[in-house]
Image (tube, rainbow, N blue to C red):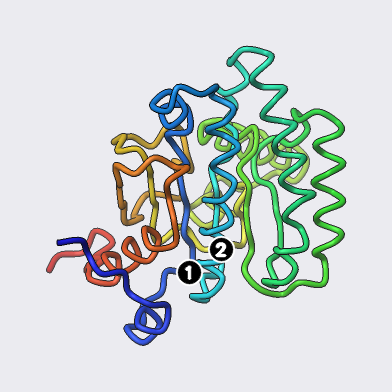
Amino acid sequence: MPTRTPSPDELIARGNIPRHVAIIMDGNGRWAKARGVPRLMGHRAGRESVREAVKGCSALGVQVLTLYTFSIENWQRPAREVSALMTILRQTLRAERAELKANNVRLQVIGRPADLPAPVREEIGATQRFLESCTGMQLNLALSYSGRAELVDAVRRIVAEARDLRLDPARIDDEFLASYLYTAGLPDPDLLIRTSGEMRLSNFMLWQLAYTELWITETLWPDFRRRHLFQAILEYQGRERRFGRSD
């Protein structure tokens, strides 16, 4: 018997809505291969899944949604595929900005956006300006992102400031280092969703995921819908988070 999908009202009534949901969107290529269509069809099909995740999280009052959109390692893919992915990203930003504004969603990019082609950076900037009056959920797109690169960038900034400010090493603790990450000022993810059944973090938010609850689904990203999101949050609500403490 299929699992019944809870409604937003039921989830909200239970309380304990995650403040920050992060998603590793995996399986576009396998989705396309299973249907005998080009890989890019899988990437395009994933746009509806992004829309479902954004609207679902926004409806529940999630404060932050972070989507692992394009990793630093993804630059190693064939140039034609990378170019097409950048085109899809630009088209998606342009097509979805009105919907994002209707849902009061803010947009931020984490990663190394300077690596992105100029037309993509311009589209991101135009979308952020379009949404600048929004006050609701923050949508983070992780672009040219790597968890290790994030830590390297943080250390570089700390070392540069230490050289100028004679930083006392005793000041460097968890909170201090976190303030130099791409996600400075945001809560760490409470829930990480990964599609396609893979059991790894893929170099994603290595610092921030220290105590995050994980929810893995065999569903491929283009097939991910709001019901999957709600099922993940329902399971999250039933877990006890100890953060390293004993029972």
Q: Nearer the viewer, residue 86 or 116?
A: 86
Q: Specify the farthest residue to the front.
A: 36
Assign a secondary structure to mark 2. strand
Q: Quadrant of residue 184?
A: bottom right
Question: The residue under label 2 is which amino acid type?
Answer: Val
Q: Looking at the picture, how far across and down is residue 241, in whole percent?
A: 26, 66
Q: Residues within 10 Å of mark 1 (few under 14, many from 20)?
A: some
Question: The residue under label 1 is which amino acid type?
Answer: Arg
Examine the rendered structure and indicate whether residue 121 appears above or below residue 55. Answer: above
Which label's residue is closer to the chain start, 2 or 1?
A: 1
Examine the rendered structure and indicate whether residue 77 appears above or below residue 186. Answer: above
Direction from residue 239 to residue 233 in the image, left or right:
right
Q: Which quadrant does the N terminus fall into?
A: bottom left
Q: Nearer the viewer, residue 206 or 98?
A: 98
Direction from residue 142 to residue 215 in the image, left or right:
left
Q: Which mark is residue 102?
A: none
Q: Looking at the picture, how far across and down is residue 33, in whole percent?
A: 43, 23
Q: Looking at the picture, how far across and down is residue 94, in whole percent?
A: 79, 49
Report the residue at 58% width, 56% height from top.
Answer: 51
Q: Nearer the viewer, residue 121 or 11?
A: 11
Q: Specify the farthest residue to the bottom.
A: 13
Assign a secondary structure to mark 1. loop
Examine the rendered structure and indicate whether residue 152 appears above or below residue 54. Answer: above
Residue carrying label 1: 19
Q: Residues within 10 Å of mark 2 (few under 14, many from 20)?
A: many
Residue carrying label 2: 64
Q: Looking at the picture, how far across and down is residue 71, in whole percent?
A: 57, 31
Report the residue at 44% width, 56% height from top.
Answer: 225
Q: For the residues marked 2 and 1, what is the alpha-carbon distance in whole angstroms?
A: 6 Å
Direction from residue 198 to residue 98 in the image, left or right:
right
Are dots 2 and 1 in contact, CB under 8 Å?
yes
